[in-house]
Structures are given as C-alpha cells and as structure tokens.
Image (cartoon, rainbow, N blue to C red):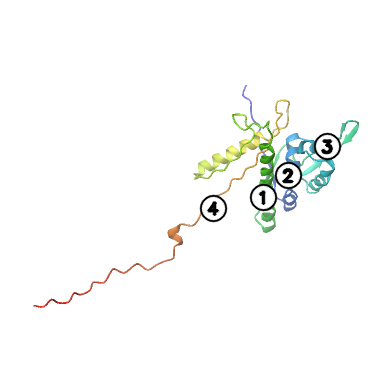
C-alpha cells in the first residue's frame, strides 16, 4: 500500500500587524514551536525554547491579539496545576509569509521580519556548532549551512520551489514517537543582483575618425 504524503496547504500571513508581531525572534520561535507540537502550554514552550515561562507570557498575549495564536477551550492538568493550551489559528495549515502586498508599511514589516529571522538562523547555527552531540556529517547530519548562486531556467526555478515546498511539508508534521527530533530550517531564495551590461551602461562616444591622409610634397622633377 502506497503511503501518501499530506499536501502542504499554507495559511498566508500578510497583515501588517501580524508581520510586525513576528518581527520578534522570540515570537517566531513560539509560533514555530506551537506548529511543530500541534498545541502547547507556556511551560511546555519554555522547556523547548530554554526560557523562563514568565518571559513568554507577554509574547503569547501579543500573538493572541493579532490572531496568530488561539487559546484552546480545554486546559491541561500538569503536576496538579491547570495549564492553558495554545495553537495556531489554523492548526491544519502552516503559517507562510505572503509577499503579494507591496505597500510601504507591509514591505517595511516584511524586511524587519526576514532580517530578524536570518539573525535567528545565525544563533541556531552558533548554538548547534557548540553542541558536541550534534551530527555534522553523513546522511543524518543535523547542521548544514550553505550558499549558492547560479543560472536557472523557468522549469528549474519551478523545481527549486517544489523542493522547498517538499522540505516545508516534511517539517510541518506533528511530533510522534518516531518523529522525535525538533529541527529548524530557514531559507532565502531571491533573484541575484546584477550589474547592468557594461556595454549598455558605457557613455556613448562618437566613432573615431580615420586618420587623415596628408598630401606628400611634390618631389622635384
């Protein structure tokens, strides 16, 4: 029997207030972790993020206010205490930035968010590189950073997007007993900046005149 992979269906995030809320790397971590766990309490988030619970309540409230998180109706009893549970607004869909709105406020919020996201990737790399138990080679490596630049056809660009979507789908699965490794993947695909063609940008010059032919003096008869 062929096992089917669930189709990745994103939930677009394009409202300026939501983008501004996600400019905080702490809130990005909270949303990513809630999506990975399916549902989570603040103490549970604190354990996964290596933070104190009191440092997270403010950020959770900010995410609730803009609709990126919702509080579930049932609580969880843990250690004799009742803990509120949170999930994303659409647990069946992974939040995904939507770039189609190009007005000034939205663009500024997006740029701030992506900049902080890349700085968070640097912190993740730094922490993992210091962990002696982190696998850095072989088919089950856990740490990999790189950069490449090259030319793509339209079909190859479609293939790149399909591969990125497949990776996102793999990381959209909730935790199970066999799926016990929490990983983070951050990527950026963008058109490479190119200098204009040197010939096209060179100032227009008049063609050089051919050297004039001087008349040689007549030789005496």
Mark before the other along the chain sequence, 1 or 3: 3
Residue wearing tag 3: 43
Q: Residue at coordinates 72% horizontally, 40% vertically from top-left?
A: 32
Q: Secondary structure at mark 3?
A: helix
Q: Which residue is mark 4?
A: 193
Q: Secondary structure at mark 4?
A: loop
Q: Earlier in the sequence, mark 3 or mark 2?
A: 2
Give the CA distance from mark 3 to mark 2.
17 Å
Left or right: 42 with respect to 153?
Answer: right
Q: Position of residue 100 (x, y in %)?
A: 64, 51
Separation of residues labelled 1 and 3 (CA atoms): 28 Å
Residue wearing tag 2:
28
Query: On the image, numbered disc 1 is attached to which residue?
Result: 115
Residue 7 is at least partly visible in this image: no
Q: Are marks 4 and 2 in contact (CB under 8 Å)?
A: no
In three-dimensional space, the C-alpha distance between marks 2 and 1, rounded to whole angstroms, equals 12 Å
| Residue drawn 39% across the image and 67% down it | 205
Q: Callout 4: few (<14), some (14-19), or many (20+) C-alpha neighbours within 10 Å?
A: few
User: Which quadrant of the view contains residue 72?
Assistant: top right
Cα separation between marks 1 and 4: 18 Å
């Amino acid at each position: 029997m062929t096992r089917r992979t669930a189709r990745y269906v994103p939930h677009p995030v394009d409202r300026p207030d939501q983008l501004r809320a996600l400019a905080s790397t702490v809130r990005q971590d909270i949303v990513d972790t809630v999506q990975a766990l399916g549902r989570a309490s603040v103490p549970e988030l604190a354990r996964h993020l290596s933070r104190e619970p009191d440092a997270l309540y403010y950020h959770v409230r900010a995410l609730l206010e803009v609709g990126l998180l919702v509080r579930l109706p049932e609580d969880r009893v843990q250690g004799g205490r009742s803990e509120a549970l949170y999930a994303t607004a659409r647990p069946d869909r992974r939040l995904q930035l939507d770039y189609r709105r190009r007005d000034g406020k939205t663009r500024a919020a997006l740029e701030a968010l992506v900049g902080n996201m890349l700085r968070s990737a640097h912190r993740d790399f730094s922490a993992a590189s210091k962990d002696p138990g982190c696998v850095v080679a072989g088919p089950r490596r856990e740490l990999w950073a790189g950069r490449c630049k090259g030319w793509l056809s339209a079909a190859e660009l479609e293939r790149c997007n399909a591969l990125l979507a497949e990776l996102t789908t793999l990381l959209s699965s909730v935790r199970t007993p066999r799926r016990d490794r929490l990983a983070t993947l951050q990527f950026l695909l963008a058109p490479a900046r190119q200098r204009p063609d040197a010939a096209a940008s060179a100032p227009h010059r008049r063609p050089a005149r051919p050297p004039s032919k001087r008349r040689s003096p007549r030789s005496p008869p």
